[in-house]
Image (tube, rainbow, N blue to C red):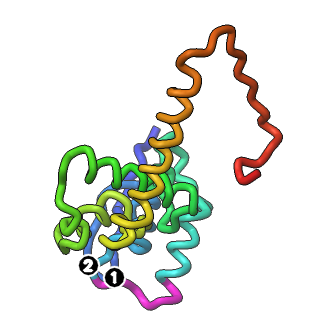
Amino acid sequence: MEKKIYTGAACKFYKQKWFCEKTSEIIAHLALQCPKPPPPEVHALYFEILNNESFNDNDNQSKITNHVERLTVTDDKQRRYSRALTKFFVTCGVPLWIIENPFFIDYSKQLYSGFQIPKRITLFTTIINVETATVTVIAEMKKKLSNETNLTLGLDEWTSPAG
């Protein structure tokens, strides 16, 4: 039985060479990593191929696109991330001006590029006020219910939280 010999592949835009049999590596390079990217139409084609996973390496290796979150963030995720960021600033005593520091912005974008970091004023006024109101409502409920006995809690999952 004769052994297969693979010569590899080379990027004609950056002159990088691969000595392997996986087409996914060159496609990922052209779509995401090439320092001298191909013309826009070629780049778009390889990006589309990568997104659709329409190539076949005949292996069980997971694709990079399965491990990377999308660049856009849903409104729900944006709220959750902003809330977590607010808790971080408040509970750790971090000065609010840090949120507008270019190094903090770069750090946050490296973690999740689609997250829109709120401005310091937005964080201080809107988000902290919402968190404070939530804590106040919970504290009032605990106070009202602390002396109750034989209490039953009902949950209606059909009703919208907005009312």
Give the label on residue 50, or none.
none
Residue 34 percent coordinates (x, y): 32, 76
How many C-alpha atoms fall within 10 Å of the one at disc 1: few (<14), some, or many (≥20)? Answer: few
Q: How many labels does the image show?
A: 2
Q: Which residue is drawn at 47% across and 67% down?
A: 71
Magenta part of the protein: which range? 36-42
Q: How far apart are marks 1 and 2 (CA)?
A: 5 Å
Residue 63 visible in rendering: no
Decide: is 153 above or below 162.
above
Q: Does the magenta stretch include residue 62?
A: no
Across and down, in percent, residue 154 comes to: 75, 25
Give the answer, above or below, for where 143 lies relative to 32.
above
**Foreground residue among 105 and 72:** 105
| Residue plotted at (19% across, 74% down) | 102
Is disc 2 surrounded by few (<14), some (14 to 19) or many (20+) residues within 10 Å?
few
Contact, mark 1 vs mark 2 (Cβ under 8 Å): yes
Amino acid, disc 1:
Lys
Secondary structure category for the residue under label 1: loop
Report whether residue 123 is seen. Answer: yes
Q: Residue at x 76, y 51 (%)?
A: 163
Q: Is 40 within the magenta?
A: yes
The spot of residue 146 in percent (x, y) is 53, 19
Q: Mark 2 points at which residue?
A: 15
Tag 2: residue type?
Lys
Residue named by callout 1: 12
